[in-house]
Image (cartoon, rainbow, N blue to C red):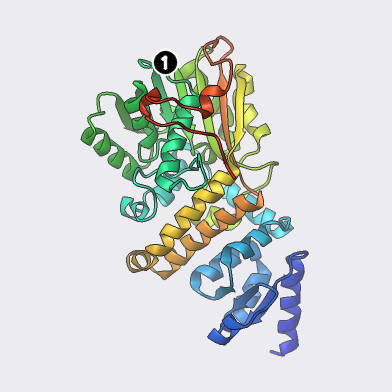
Amino acid sequence: MPAWIDRILMSAIEKMADPIPIRLELGAPSPADSSTPFTLPAIWLKDRRALFALVRNPAINFGELYSQGRLEIEGDLIRLLESLYRVPQGVIARTASRCYGWMQSNSLRSSRKNIHHHYDISNEFYQMWLDAEMVYACAYFPHENATLEEAQRAKLDLVCRKLSLRPGETVVEAGCGWGALALHMAKYYGVRVKAFNISHEQITFARERARREGLASQVEFLEDDYRNIAGSFDVFASVGMLEHVGRSYYGEFGRVIHRAIGNRGRGLLHFIGKNRRQPLSAWIRKRIFPGGSTPPLRDVMTILEPHDYSVVDVENLRLHYARTCEHWLNRFEQCYERVVERYGTVFGRMWRLYLAGSTAAFRAGSLQLFQLVFAGRACNSLPLTRDHLYRRTAGQGGQDMEWIHAMS
């Protein structure tokens, strides 16, 4: 095939990325290439077939080719991805994402399959690069030099303070991960928690930790879907689970919340979202988060408004999540060889791209992290000011420290 066809195809890809300047190359970068001071970031495509695949469907095949080692990035992967995230999604990308949205239902049966795909890889895999408490959600960095462990504990405590937990209250948590928040609530705030999750690996881990820490009488972990929540509670909490509900199920989710806390309770939703309604990356939906969605705030209001819930606090922790993902990626790179040995090179490169892409998306502002506190119309027990959120005195909530709300 003539070389001029390659030039036409590469020119077409460069125009797709407009106005972000990129450099496309065929072949594999050599050490000499890496040491040459180019002004443009470079994407190296292994061969003509990889070039055709990228032109045909960049929304899917960029990630596929990178995972397979048929596409390489010269230079800083995160910076290149951050630049690409600033380019508006094209028709192909939006269509591909919507197709996966139609195919990947969040019904009772399909949700188990979707959750199993991501969270039941193995606890060992996540232990390689998460913090010691296995918190797989945005951390909160109270100061510039906070470690990931400190930031995740700060986030757990911030959630508890936003919910104004009091000893003796009852909490229901929808989607509890490996149990860190439920156990933190019980240990430091004296509440009783019932936590729901359909990931078998996570529930097994959480139950064992509760037993080991002597909290099994205060926290009950149920391997069950949020739609089966029953009983009456003071507080509803959901951290990192709304992304798995899906907009078509928001009405049902709202009814579950109202059934649990009625008009007197209060709750918190912590979720990845967007500034406006846009489909999640098609490749992410295909390979990482089947059934996933990242809603704008206006869609989340459809959960709360039918039940007359008042929104009492909204905070965007986008830059905290960018920093969280940076920590995760750094830890992942440190154990990359172990990951490849256990799960294969394609898996390792796929997860590297996912973590780097998440970091880039939060930096670029294409993803947001919202914490939304709401309360029933008959709930009059929330604090009058926000002082309790950002400043602590020794001993409050079992934490012998003072948290200062500060981000440089």
Image side of residue 21 versus residue 157, left or right: right
Residue nearer the viewer, 212 or 262: 212
Look at 56% across and 9% down and name the residue there.
378
- The answer to whether residue 233 shows anywhere in this view is yes
Image side of residue 50 versus residue 87, left or right: left
Residue nearer the viewer, 273 or 186: 186
Residue nearer the viewer, 64 or 355: 355
Quadrant of the image for the N terminus? Answer: bottom right
- Please say if 37 is above or below 217: below
Residue 164 image position (x, y, % from top left): 47, 20
Q: Which residue is mark 1?
A: 232
Residue 344 image position (x, y, % from top left): 38, 68
How many numbered circles does the render carry?
1
- Please say if 159 is above or below 342: above
Q: Residues within 10 Å of mark 1 (few under 14, many from 20)?
A: some
Farthest residue, direction bottom: 2
Image side of residue 391 versus residue 311, left or right: left
Residue nearer the viewer, 224 or 320: 320
Residue 169 image position (x, y, % from top left): 39, 16
- The answer to whether residue 256 shows anywhere in this view is no
Quadrant of the image for the C terminus? Answer: top right
**Callout 1 amino acid:** Ser
Residue 204 image position (x, y, % from top left): 28, 41
Q: Quadrant of residue 62?
A: bottom right
Image side of residue 89 versus residue 171, left or right: right
Look at 68% across and 53% down and name the residue there.
94
Mark 1: which secondary structure? loop
Look at 46% across and 47% down and name the residue there.
114
